[in-house]
Image: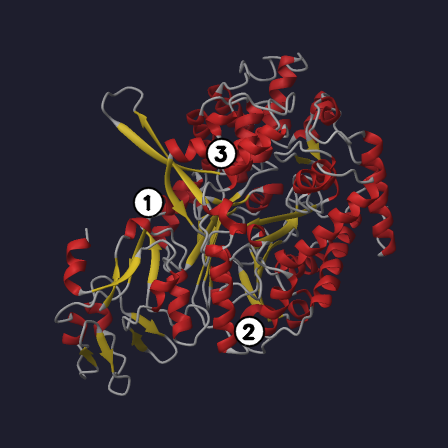
Amino acid sequence: MQVNDPLSNVLYIDLSKRTFEVKRRDDIFERYLGGTGAAIKLLHEECPEDCDPHGPENPIIFTVGPLTALFPLASKTVAMFKSPHTGNLGESHCGGRSAVAIRMAGYGAIVIKGTSDIPIYISIDNKQVHFRDATTLWGMGSFSSGRVIRENETGAGLRTIMRIGKAGEKLISYASVISETYRHFGRLGLGAVFGSKKLKAVVVSGKSSLPVVDMKQYRKAYNEIYNSAVKSPVMKKYHDLGTPENVLPLNEFGGLPTRNLKEAQFEKAEVISGESLAEHYLGRRLACSNCPVGCIHIAALREPYEDEAYFYKTTMISYDYEPIYALGTMLGMNSAKDYLRLMDRVEAWGIDAMSAGVVLAWATEAQEKGIISEKETLDVKLGWGDVQSYITALRNIIEQPNEFYTALARGIEHTISIYGGEDFALAFGGNEMPGYHTGPGAHIGTLIGTRHSHLDNAGYSFDQKLLAKEEKSPEDLVDILVEEEIWRQILSSLVICFFARGIYSPELVSRLLNITGFDVSEADLDRIGREIYVEKYRFKMREGFKLDDMRIPKRIFETPSPIKQLDEAYIRKALEHVKEILAQEGVFQN
Amino acid sequence: MRLAVLETEKCVGCQLCMFACSRRQNEAGLAKSCIGVKSIGGMERGFSVIVCRACENPPCAKVCPTDALTPREGGGVHVDLEKCIGCGHCREACVIGAIYWDDEINKPMICIHCGFCVNFCPHGVLGMEKKKEIEHASK
């Protein structure tokens, strides 16, 4: 990398002492590029074994990559931490302006440790870290607190405002962090780690110049990527309907989890499809920094005041595939308006839409089956499609007025340890399931993915593109998934949006890295990706992760998926094979 | 011809114009960009695109004590960095905040209306126009 590239500046912040320092860490960025690679290295350094996720020693690590602010679509920030949700590796990615702002402020990584005694927010620019009293902001929703900070701080247009809502403050283990109003570090509870540190928000702003090896080559390569992104068919779906384009095809395929996966098709899918939302509600489009696609879809929900005629309010609410699945089909929501109302609350309170939806779906079925009663739910009668019952229950999850809601606030895995109902508790590796019941690829993918996310290895995609055509042995399937996950370590070390994976080939990535001063070949990329993958599993095993202990909810076998080749023996064989792969790399479960 | 913000409401906030402006100057990053995009009090309300409007009789040039800023033919101003003393009066005189600042040399950076950024606006927010047409188009 270039000697004057600010990428290897790591900003270390201590909230307990209210101090900060900057260290050059060429060693990390030369070896792991940035993003997820740099983050796992920093996590190994900064996160003590068995530490309390809510303790001052749990680090919050933000990283960006060498291509950020240089090339289009390399605008994700990786967050790493010990997850309060799973008690293990926490990793979440967010777009918006976060990555470009961090890079332009002159950093490749920010490490936040310690705990503040009073609520604070921190404001980071090219020179300084300011610690500001956030007492007045505590208890505020994510929209309002963003508004206040926006007015208070400089750097408009060049900044990110990453903040939590009430869920983070109340330590809901799947609380999110929200940036730029509509983008999220959604999964695995970064919001609760913020809350445990009394950290309401992190503002980062800056502008700087970046070095490149060859300006002419740089400009040429930029044009090449820009043209691919604007003209090529590989990004068209994100450009047009956005991620909700998936709703109808998945429904038709029979892989759209519905009513806690009692079914895999939703009779009202049309109502909350990308097509229908675009036609009736789409009010604005937004883009992350340096993204020519602009996949962010915002609905305009116009509603009358409840008690006053001819008065209306219009709320702008973002929608995407996964929230439509979790808060829509999983809850049997048969009106787009109701889905948007629930989404708006999820956004304001700052809770992971996916986990929240799956938790509520489990609770609905548990009440249906009589495992819990209205004594536990405090008279709330949860009903498929009954948005008011879900909003009330969600508020209770955040306020935790009794033991039941306190349990739900820690997710499904924890709740079933008290109340039972594990057969229909749809969490994998402790993380609530994503919106795919497509076949073995989807479920094995989330089980073995390092962060138990559908984006780890895109198993759902292999179900539809590969397994729909030919059978694969569990071993072959795992090999395919692991190879995909290894390549994705490179993409997320360069913080390239996965939606642009069709453009960023290994050949292009290696060429771009050369332009930015990294001497990295395609073969090197494979080696680095593998190393990062192994380092993540090393961390997971260190914290007690066991492939042998993976709970597989029976529900996924009861409800037929489009790819029939799905049973427990198949999955167990797949897990065994992951152990073999890791053993070859010297990584073993305890 | 001058650069014009044709339809701010169409802006999605991608900031590609800002990065384009840097590249046009053989720069990478945002330090030298002469155009800015910021939200109007939050992303939900949309954006404003801030760049030199090529005023007739530009106030920035009028307040320059060293005559470093001179109106350009076709709109905009020319900055003579030799003459500029970095006083910042021009920046204060521009009510839309379109005078950006080069912190490295402590001098103004102002759009030269080259139109390079227009090629990288995927949504038709920016365009090149003759002066008269723009005044009719603006809201």
> Which chain is mark 1 on?
B
Q: Residue A313's spot in the image, x, y percent?
A: 30, 31
Element on which disc 1 rests: helix
Q: Which residue in the protein does label 2 denote?
A: A5
- Say which label, 2 or 3, has the lower sequence index: 2
Instruction: Give residue A22's position: percent from left, percent from top.
Output: 57, 68
Give the residue displayed 49% in from the left and 67% down from the top.
A222
Residue shown at the point (39%, 56%) measured from the top left: B122
Q: Is residue A526 left or right of residue B70?
A: right
Q: Chain of mark 2?
A: A
Characterize the local packing of mark 1: few (<14), some (14-19) or many (20 or more) Cα atoms within 10 angstroms.
few
Q: CA distance from mark 2 to mark 3?
A: 39 Å
Q: Is residue B61 visible?
A: yes
Residue at figure coordinates x 58%, y 35% from the top left: A354
Q: In this rendering, does residue A403 appear at all?
A: no
Please give the name of the residue rendered at 35% of the width and 65% of the height, measured from the top-left corner: B117
| Residue type at tag 1 | Arg
* Tag 1 residue: B45
Which residue does the numbered mark 3 point to in the structure image? A346
Residue A277 lies, in percent from the top left, at 43, 33
Amino acid type, mark 2 = Asp
Relative to A53, residue A170 above or below: above
